[in-house]
Image (cartoon, rainbow, N blue to C red):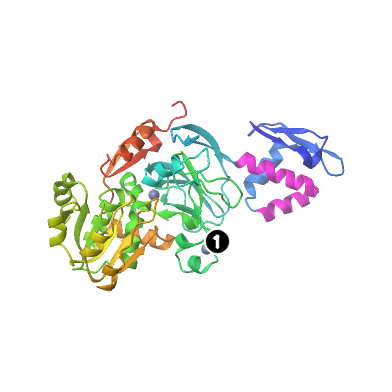
Amino acid sequence: MIQWENGDRNSGSTKTVVPSLGSVVGEGRTEFNESFRLPVTLLREMNVKNKDAATFQKNCLELNLSRFIYNFMGEISEQVNQKNALGWAARDTSGLLSPFTFSRRATGEKDVTFKVMYCGICHSDLHMLKNEWGVSTYPLVPGHEVVGLVTEVGSKVEKFKVGDKVGVGCMVGSCRSCDNCANNIENYCRNYILTYGAKYYDGTITYGGYSDVMVVDEHFVVRIPEKLPLDATAPLLCAGITVYSPLRFYGLDKPGMHVGVVGLGGPGHVAVKFAKAMGVKVTVISTSPNKKKESIEHLGVDSFLVSRDQDEMQAAMDTMDGIIDTVSAPHPLLPLIGLLKSNGKLVLVGAPEKPLELPVFPLLLGRKMVGGSNIGGMKETQEMLDFAAKHNITAEIELIPMDYVNTAMERLLKADVRYRFVIDIANTLKSSS
Ligand SMILES: [Zn+2]
Ligand SMILES: [Zn+2]
């Protein structure tokens, strides 16, 4: 049942109740105090046939409806077309997730609506749930590694059709007019809109992929290549592009190069896979020696350095062309800079809460660079997925049911996951849970 109060727009007038597809009328009074009654069938008819505003307006004019009724119907029709959605949300800084019903906007002319199949759990979800970056709003439905199947497309959508396998990563909007947007690096647009917890153009707050349905402008939707499994591909949409983009941009993608990867979590383990596929020699630098055996045998890492082992680190000085540093906790940069050859590049993709200390001397004495990188643009995200399909790259995942998510968050906090949790949304997100 959809309810709309016309309030101050038409004071002293009526309240209108429009059952979703019932036979009751919409009614009220215009600004000239004329009463009106609108059959819902009329509303439905106009709405189903006329997705775009211009046709809708023309229809209203033909029916001799006043401006007021036109606006009125526009609002009701938007509400009638809204989709009921079910997700899991945190309500406060405890970060505890529980079922949450909300609505998604109607499929706009450039929108792709899809049924969510799987959603990866990114470490930043954990930060956002607990408002550790101070920007969270509640209720918060996280999730920016979202994959699913298209169920509806708007009239002006060109790239997708019903049934397509699609994905959405960290952003769902950007200004589309700045230099960054024009150069396909929407991820550096000052006005980009995050997939969850951000304000969308229509003033609503964005909700992420821990939910059963998504409605996203097609520009921010990518195609999942046919041969990739949906569940293990989900993490590529954040963790994957986070490391793929800097490997390319900083030129650490040339066969025969030697690249270090710091931290063997979600982004780190896919960095290894991408770098290997590019023909690069990969050394993992980690605090946990217990990951050594598996990373060499299973991920194909060429060598493994335990960062606390001074002898190992000393022996590897001046050997790397670049390093992708995925660690988001405070850590010393000096030992990492030492690992670089002259002209080497240390690229930070983790986001420690406090500034790191930057030793300048070792940079000068070797013309070394320290840089950063944040996900990737839409064009490059698609390129990354196509590259992954070509080289059979997916994430190593632990598939979990929706109601395990709070436990998963506790484990993630202790880095107790190999290497990414993915929620089986389609099979386990149920309204009764
Ligand atoms: Zn992420
Ligand atoms: Zn922009």
Does residue 206 appear in this view?
yes
The one of 71 and 288 positioned closer to us in this rendering: 288
Residue 85 position, x and y percent, is 52, 37
Residue topped by disc 1 = 175
**Measured along the vertical axis of the image, is residue 48 above or below residue 84?**
below
Residue 66: say if magenta: yes
Left-right relation of 190 to 357: right
State the SS at label 1: loop
Does residue 385 appear in this view?
no
Residue extending furthest toward the top:
432
Residue 426 position, x and y percent, is 40, 37
Kind of residue at badge 1: Cys
Disc 1 under 8 Å from ligand 2? The reply is yes
Q: Which residue is drawn at 35% across and 57% down?
A: 356
Left-right relation of 373 to 391: right
The segment highlighted magenta reads: 53-81
Q: Which residue is drawn at 57% across and 44% down?
A: 105
Residue 218 position, x and y percent, is 49, 55
Q: Please tell me in which quadrant of the rendered image residue 259 appears.
A: bottom left
The one of 26 and 133 positioned closer to us in this rendering: 133
Left-right relation of 140 to 3: left
Dominant SS of magenta comes to helix
The one of 218 and 135 positioned closer to us in this rendering: 135
